[in-house]
Image (cartoon, rainbow, N blue to C red):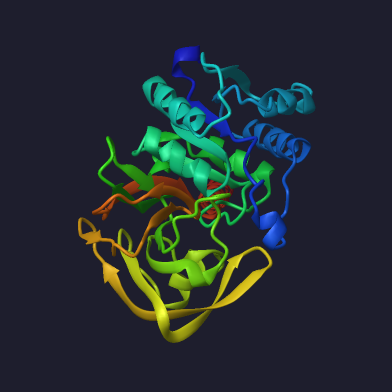
Amino acid sequence: MSASNIPVIGLIANPLASKDVRRLVGLARVVDVEEKANLIARLLVGMTAGPMVRVVALPDSGGLVERAVRLTRGRMPEVEFLPMKAASTEADSRRAAEQLRDLGAALIVVVGGDGTIRSVVEGWPESVLVPVAAGTNNAISIVDEPTVIGFATALATVDDMAERVLDQCSALSVDTGHDRSSIAVVDVVGVRTRWVGSGALWDGSDLVEAIVTNVRPTAVGIAAVAAALGDLSAGSARYIRFGDGPTVRALLGPGLVADVGVVHHEIIEPGETVDLDPASRVVALDGERRLVSAGRCTVEVVPGPKLLSVRRTMEYRSHHIEGCQKSL
């Protein structure tokens, strides 16, 4: 097979993920450089169990992928790096996603947290993602063994498998009146204080309202509140108004449990928009306070990225092998 015909898998690792204040106010773990490099090494080794692929990676500022390559001792697919210099900001992930789009990558493996995934989606909204948990809340990330994730990622590059093992997600387009809209992949939360500080959300008394796309029952963060209020159909989101009402016991982060008052909630369908209350002085995207609202702030439910289902990929493989055995 010529190099031009070998599927490309993008790899974006964030050395800054899992380092916010929730290590101080809760019990969130710290995923250090060595652990992240080991995780990436296992991903690369797992890819060698599937069809031939080549990996094109972000040259991250922490040298995570370079460390991982050394750890594999050659048990990995071909790895090359994008022609860019990392600046140790979230723009690194966005720029890398844009370049991987231009290269025609089949999937992008993202090693980080919800914020890293958001940056990748801002760079390539229609991307196919394999989000590997290495952040704090990890509301939509995959928590399986990285070797298995790597194997499934390589398997998913086969043409007749791809559409069988992908889940379409919704996202939130946020217009704050600035030059360009921002994207959230898990939630947009209105906070009543102007204080941005460390970015992370951990105090339920600050909450005004939220729009949430993810209601995985095992999630933490604002997604845990949304999950307690019921299921969502594909492509929809849930609006929540917080206040003095019936409480929901929520897991706001690792080691953070709080009772949050909910006065109203409703389903927001694809294409619908919500104008945030002016009481929302700061808007948090995917758990991090980033945008200070200036006047009108509008959130629209839009199509998001596609996510790899590791479970369905491995199930499909096992059924295929069983069918081959029966035909012998």
Picture quadrant of residue 275: bottom left
**Taking 11 as reference, is 110 above or below it?**
below
Name the quadrant of the C terminus: top right
Q: Nearer the viewer, residue 28 or 22?
A: 22
Picture quadrant of residue 52: top right
- 149 lies left or right of 209: right
Q: Residue at x 61, y 44 (%)?
A: 149
Q: Nearer the viewer, residue 35 or 142?
A: 35
Q: Residue furthest bottom?
A: 246
Question: Would residue 298 be seen by someone viewing this image from the given angle?
Answer: yes
- Where residue 185 sits in the image (x, y, percent)? 41, 51
The number of numbered badges drawn on the structure is: 0
- Where residue 318 sits in the image (x, y, percent)? 57, 51
- Where residue 61 sits in the image (x, y, percent)? 63, 25
- 298 lies left or right of 289: left
Q: Nearer the viewer, residue 108 or 267?
A: 267
Q: Residue furthest left?
A: 272
Q: Residue at x 54, y 39 (%)?
A: 110
Q: Residue furthest front?
A: 194
**Taking 122 as reference, is 266 above or below it?**
below
Q: Residue at x 50, y 34 (%)?
A: 90
**Taking 84 as reference, is 322 above or below it?**
below
Question: Would residue 130 be seen by someone viewing this image from the given angle?
Answer: no
- Where residue 220 sits in the image (x, y, percent)? 56, 64
**Taking 282 as reference, is 1 above or below it?**
above
Q: Nearer the viewer, residue 81 or 252?
A: 252
